[in-house]
Amino acid sequence: MERPHKYGADDRMSDLICTDYPLLMVMSRFGLSLGFGDKTVREACQAQGVDYRTFLAVANFIAEDQYTYSEDDTDFSLPALMDYLKRAHTYFLDFNLPAIRRKLIEALDYAGEADLSYLIMRFYDEYAKEVRRHMEYENEAVFTYVEGLMQGRLDEHYDIATFASKHNQIDAKLKELKNIIIKYYPAGQCNNLLNAVLFDIFNCEQDLASHCQVEDYLFVPAVAAVERRLRNGQ
């Protein structure tokens, strides 16, 4: 019988990471530490207090480009998924975006293109502020709303469809920044540094896009299902 998804609870966690190394980020955002030996996904998650069904839902979603949601065959914990999204926000805001900024400063300083360097850094800083506004709104407004739902409280003035209708993709400006550097920044002594930071920008762009897809295709439909159950008195 064909497996419904790429990865299952009885697969070894180490095999998942070695097969799809981007799942390292998923593992990290669930708070899972390395050093799980030959434990299965279920065993590794349970040993560290993580809901393995939610981990698998996200891991399979990302590994399979599975942009669908069904209440019948998707079994995961909404609180666990929300915790994953919060950790992802912390990663982007407190680690990844500042790290790229430091590398960008180092690469641009070596080139000696002061005017263009200044414009690139200003563009990047404006972008980082936009990401922070986006994620802090989700942390403070959306997740607070969902926590209320999970306690049985509906809000007459807000629902998850309102959020979804305004949920913009936050990776678009990174595409612009990447194109500015590729097309207009002159080659110089810092080629290796600039190429390295460009590589990080490509990875960040893909990571942010994947993050938004998890929100759009897993989180939003799951919250909508809770809203329906509450409205129907279930």
Image (cartoon, helix red, strand yellow):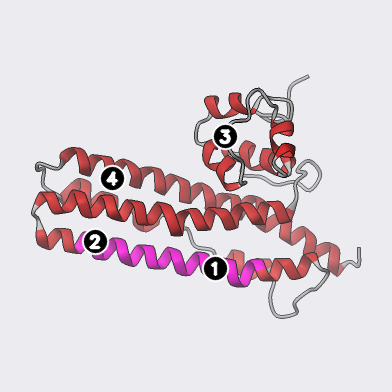
Of the residues under marks 2 and 1, which one precedes in the sequence? 2
Q: Which residue is mark 2?
A: 121
Q: Which residue is mark 1?
A: 166
Marks 3, 4: nearer the viewer:
3
Residue at horizontal 59 percent and vertical 31 percent from the top: 35
Of the residues under marks 4 and 1, which one precedes in the sequence? 1
Q: Is residue 139 magenta?
A: yes
Of the residues under marks 4 and 2, which one precedes in the sequence? 2
SS for dot 2: helix
Q: Amino acid at mark 2?
A: Met
Q: Is residue 170 visible?
A: no
Residue at horizontal 81 percent and vertical 63 percent from the top: 228
Q: Which residue is mark 4?
A: 197
In the image, is 221 to the left or to the right of 98? right
Q: Amino acid at mark 1?
A: Lys
Q: Residue furthest bottom?
A: 157
Q: Position of residue 177 (x, y in %)?
A: 28, 54
